Amino acid sequence: MVLQYLGFAGLALLVIAWIPETLQNYKEKGKNLNLKFVMLYLFGSAFLAAHAYLINDFIFMALNSLAALIALANACIIILPGKNKKRRG
């Protein structure tokens, strides 16, 4: 039971650390992000989440699922045009 609490604490700390970074990336429209890195991180996290699911490791499944979602959000920030960007035409 203690190991689960350690795992949940680590999960919470990592997610808390990612939130301000993602919000900052949103404000900066992804200017400081490398799309190749974000995509590798997205797919790597998704594969690790699938692996954790297959071996019934809830904590790592949750962690890597959240990591994949945050990477997906960052990819969307880079790829999708923001409302503050000027349109050509």
Image (cartoon, grey):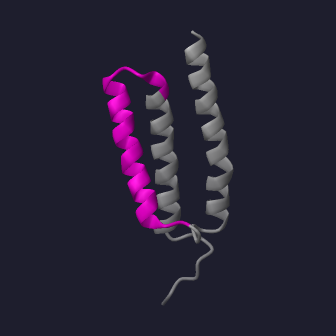
Residue in view at x 51 percent, y 53 percent: 73
Residue in view at x 54 percent, y 66 percent: 33
Q: Count numbered badges in the picture.
A: 0
Residue furthest to the top in view is 1
Magenta stretch contains residue 54 = yes
Query: What residue span does the magenta drawing correspond to?
Result: 33-59
Magenta stretch contains residue 24 = no
Q: Quadrant of the N terminus?
A: top right
Residue furthest to the bottom in view is 89
Q: Nearer the viewer, residue 62 or 2?
A: 2
Residue in view at x 67 percent, y 59 percent: 24
Above or below residue 40? Residue 8 is above
Above or below residue 77? Residue 20 is above
Residue 89 image point, x, y percent: 48, 90
Query: In the image, is 17 to the left or to the right of 35?
Result: right
Residue 29 image point, x, y percent: 60, 68
Residue 13 image point, x, y percent: 65, 35
Query: In the image, is 81 to the left or to the right of 49?
Result: right
Question: Magenta part mainly helix, strand or loop?
Answer: helix
Residue 9 image point, x, y percent: 64, 26
Q: Nearer the viewer, residue 55 or 84?
A: 55
Query: In the image, is 61 to the left or to the right of 18?
Result: left
Above or below residue 32? Residue 53 is above
Above or below residue 31? Residue 89 is below
Query: In the image, is 30 to the left or to the right of 56?
Result: right
Residue in view at x 45 percent, y 23 percent: 58
